[in-house]
Amino acid sequence: MVSGAVRTYRLLSDGRRQINSFHLPGDMFGFENGKSHRFSAEALVETKVRIVRQRALLCSMADQAGGTTKLIRLVTQNLQDAESHMLLLRRKTALEKVAAFLLEMDERQFRPDVMELPMSRRDIGDYLGLTLETVSREISILRDAGLLRFVGTTQRRLSLLNREELSRYDS
């Protein structure tokens, strides 16, 4: 990813959508073992991506000093992210899920003063296994508790006011 944001997702047999991941600048995605992709990808905002063939990427990394280490780090980070997402979906309350999501986005955006959420609340719900209404309610609870505030007229820009307290919901 060069700029923008992408969601990867799968449509379930009953018509529901399960979002696998949100990809932000600097992320790599789309690697598969087989010839077909298991997930679809859609840009959430104006997005620029760089397409690289898997063989070219592997050759390039093999030629670089420390390339193998970088590749292993990328693969293990993707596994760690998948494990964290599975735990999030199975073992947390709705409030814990939303708090964990906000902290994840905050960390991935390098803890900005004002965080931009390129995804809708419906997208967040499909990622967390919650309804749009539940996501909205839990974000309001966190706002009313003084842990975040909205910036501007859109509710996609927010500031985390107390990361330490927010992280208690994610424990």
Image (spheres, grey):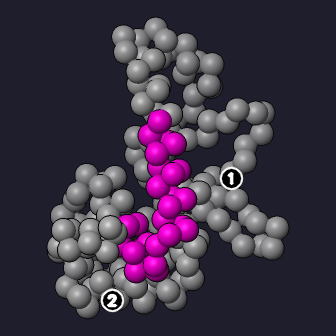
Q: Residues within 10 Å of mark 2 (few under 14, many from 20)?
A: some
Q: Give left or right: position of 26 versus 168.
A: right
| SS type, badge 1 | strand
Residue 160 in view in this figure? no
| Residue name at image x 41 percent, y 21 percent | 69
Q: Which residues are magenta?
A: 76-101
Closer to us: 167 or 37: 167
Find residue 1 and report its horizontal and vertical position in percent: 47, 42
Find residue 102 and report its horizontal and vertical position in percent: 35, 68
| SS type, badge 2 | helix
| Residue name at image x 36 percent, y 10 percent | 65
Earlier sequence position, callout 2 versus callout 1 = 1
Find residue 121 and report its horizontal and vertical position in percent: 49, 77
Give the dominant element type of the magenta stretch: helix, strand or loop.
helix
Residue 81 falls inside the magenta stretch: yes
Closer to us: 69 or 169: 169
* Residue corresponding to mark 1: 40
Q: Indicate whether 63 appears above or below 98.
A: above
| Residue name at image x 51 percent, y 42 percent | 79
Please state which amino acid type lies under the numbered disc 2. Ile
Evaluate if marks 2 and 1 touch, with contact meaning CB atoms under 8 Å apart. no
Q: Indicate whether 158 appears above or below 27.
A: below
* Residue corresponding to mark 2: 141
Quarter of the picture holding the C terminus: bottom left
Q: How many marks?
A: 2
Residue 56 in view in this figure? yes
